[in-house]
Image: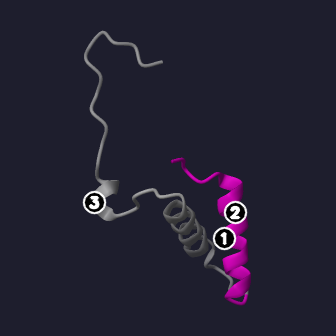
Amino acid sequence: MHTPHENDIRDRAYALWQEAGSPEGREEEFWHRAERELSEESGLDTSDLASGVTQPLPPAGILTH
């Protein structure tokens, strides 16, 4: 599973915006909707519960990058 690519989100958001009649001032709404739709299509968990999950920190002394 992967995070939707920014270009894919932009294309979907633009299509959604056009379908809605190209309303002004609602760019973020369409961006978030496109991001959510693409995430759901790729099988990512976008629930509120999943958004609160954090990754544990590695033990001290272990390099991560």
| Left or right: where 53 falls relative to 27 | left
Q: Main secondary structure of the magenta part?
A: helix
Question: What is the crowding at mark 3: few (fewer than 14 residues within 10 Å), some, or many (at least 20)?
Answer: few
- The location of residue 34, given as percent across then percent down, is 59, 69
2 and 1 marks in contact (CB < 8 Å): yes
Question: What is the crowding at mark 2: few (fewer than 14 residues within 10 Å), some, or many (at least 20)?
Answer: some
- The location of residue 29, given as percent across then percent down, is 55, 75
Which quadrant of the view contains residue 48?
bottom left
- The location of residue 38, given as percent across then percent down, is 57, 63
Is 7 included in the stretch rendered in magenta?
A: yes
Which quadrant of the view contains residue 58?
top left
Q: Report the colour scheme.
A: one colour
Highlighted magenta segment, given as a residue range: 1-21
Which residue type carries mark 3? Leu
The residue indicated by pointer 1 is 13
Which quadrant of the view contains residue 4?
bottom right
Which residue type carries mark 2? Arg
3 and 2 marks in contact (CB < 8 Å): no
Q: Is residue 61 above or below residue 57?
A: above
Q: Earlier in the sequence, mark 1 or mark 3?
A: 1
Of residues 36 and 28, the one drawn nearer to the viewer in this rendering: 36
- The location of residue 30, given as percent across then percent down, is 60, 74
